[in-house]
Amino acid sequence: MFALELFQPFMVCMAPVLIAALVQVLFGRPVLELAMRGTLAALGLASAWTYFQMNRRIVEIRFRQERVAMVSVWKAAQRNPSLAWERALDVRPVDRGFRTTVGHTTYELTRADWPELDKIAEGLRATQP
């Protein structure tokens, strides 16, 4: 899963490295050290960005008693994730769906991403204090 998500950011990060290597070759300068260090830097940056994106993207919303847990791609891929069970502090309709604040984070849930959004909004309202 991580490798599939990593591909596009890695290619974007490698573009400047490849351009710099091409320029070095055209000027007749050594390119191996630049290519090796640039590739490592691109891989590190792309990995950090992929990890950040996978923790940010919500793919599951779980309800338990009067609490809700927003589950990211990263947590959903884990065998036994530790979830933060919190209350929804605010649930408001917006143009494309709902905006909700769970804990200290605000999420925008769109109808395109969540087909049963009305049921989810009801569940979120039930967890409000």
Image (tube, grey):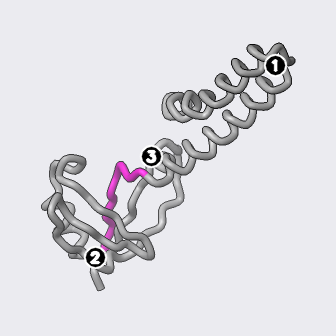
* Three-letter code, disc 1: Val
For label 1, the residue is 31
59 part of magenta stretch: yes
Q: Secondary structure at mark 2?
A: loop
Left or right: where does residue 30 sit relative to residue 60? right
101 part of magenta stretch: no
For label 2, the residue is 127
Q: Is residue 2 visible?
A: no
Q: Secondary structure at mark 1?
A: loop
Closer to the camera, 114 or 23? 23
Q: Nearer the viewer, mark 2 or mark 3?
A: 3
**Label 3 crowd (10 A; few <14 / some 14-19 / many >=20):** some
Between marks 2 and 3, how big is the CA–CA gap? 23 Å
For label 3, the residue is 73
> Magenta stretch?
57-66
Which secondary structure class fits the magenta region best? strand
**Residue at 80% from the left image edge and 31% from the top image edge:** 37
**Residue at 67% from the left image edge and 34% from the top image edge:** 43
Between marks 1 and 2, how big is the CA–CA gap? 58 Å
Looking at the image, the residue that sits furthest to the bottom is 129
* Three-letter code, disc 2: Thr
Residue 109 x, y percent position in the rendering: 26, 58
Left or right: where does residue 54 sit relative to residue 19? left
**Label 2 crowd (10 A; few <14 / some 14-19 / many >=20):** some
Between marks 3 and 1, how big is the CA–CA gap? 38 Å
Q: Is residue 105 visible?
A: yes
Residue 96 x, y percent position in the rendering: 17, 58
